[in-house]
Image (cartoon, rainbow, N blue to C red):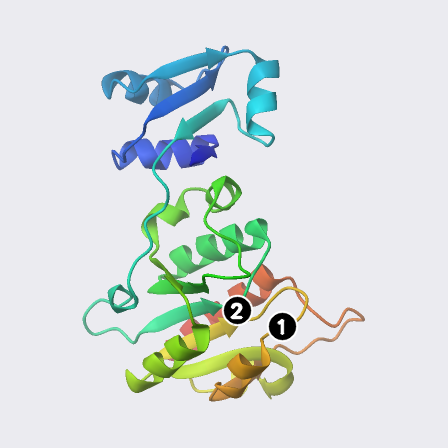
Amino acid sequence: MYVYGKNVATELLKKNKKIYKAIIYENFNDKFIISALQNLKIPTKIMTKKQIDEFAKGNHQGIILSIPDYEFKDLDDLTPESGQLPFIVILDHIEDPHNFGAIIRTCEAAGVDGIIIPKDRSVDVNSTVMKTSAGALENIKICMVTNLNNTIKSLKKKGYWIVGTDMDGTNYDEIDYNVPIALIIGNEGHGMSRLTKESCDFIAKIPMKGKVNSLNASVATGIMIYEVLKNRK
């Protein structure tokens, strides 16, 4: 997988992650990245601006790295540190890689234990997700499952309360989150699927006072995550 951007490159190099090769712009001048590439003896190819622009097709900031594909975690790996209430985010067929990357960044910043995504009809971990997450992907656990509803049933058996998000529900600040929580964020266009919605213990509604009746998925995720944390505090 190719990833790009200074933040991503810096995070990977600091953690000494496996990097097959690097491609950099001929006038690239980030001293830390250049020094780290040299010290780690990572094969590096120099390109002109035109060449690297055609290769990356995105805001690469002059650096592209070839790395192994992302390794997903098992469901049992998404456990909190001792003494903390579990908190997992489930993405019900999120399709936009920018949304996914932003959600990863928020989850990592808030200390969420992990993210669950379905295998089908969902964005995968790719270069855009990695770039948008600004390196946070390296510090968050993501589990990919074949059947979301079976996974929800398994979480319920482990003691999780399932909180979905929808315009028809209880105000988000009227729910008690002082229990193990699995928060579900629905698809950008269709929201939660029917079976997923029926599996929820609570449906949380973010009040809307403007003329727009919905929020961007990553924004809604951020609001809900910090409401959970505020409630627990």
Assign the C terminus to one quadrant of the image.
bottom left
Residue in the picture at 60% in, 22% down: 53
User: From this viewpoint, which residue is outermost toward the left?
Assistant: 82
Q: Residues within 10 Å of mark 2 (few under 14, many from 20)?
A: many
Give the x, y percent position of residue 184: 49, 73
Q: Quadrant of the N terminus?
A: top left
Q: Which mark is residue 20?
A: none
Task: Give the image quarter of residue 214.
Answer: bottom right
Residue name at image x 20 percent, y 74 percent: 83
Which residue occupies the foreground of this view, 62 or 173?
62
Q: Earlier in the sequence, mark 2 or mark 1?
A: 2
**From what the image shows, is residue 199 above or below residue 12?**
below
Depth check, front residue: 52 or 37: 52
The correct choice, above or below, for 86 with respect to 179 in the image is above
Q: Is residue 84 above or below residue 177?
A: above
Q: Which residue is mark 2?
A: 92
Q: Which mark is residue 191?
A: 1
| Element marked by disc 2 | loop
- Residue type at tag 1: Gly
Q: Residues within 10 Å of mark 1 (few under 14, many from 20)?
A: some
**Residue 160: percent from left, percent from top:** 35, 82
Task: Confirm or deny contact between disc 2 and disc 1 (CB under 8 A).
Answer: yes
Percent coordinates x, y for residue 126 in the rendering: 48, 44
Q: Quadrant of the rendered structure where residue 43 is? A: top left
Q: Is residue 52 visible?
A: yes
Q: Amino acid at mark 2?
A: Asp
Q: Residue at x 22, y 67 (%)?
A: 81
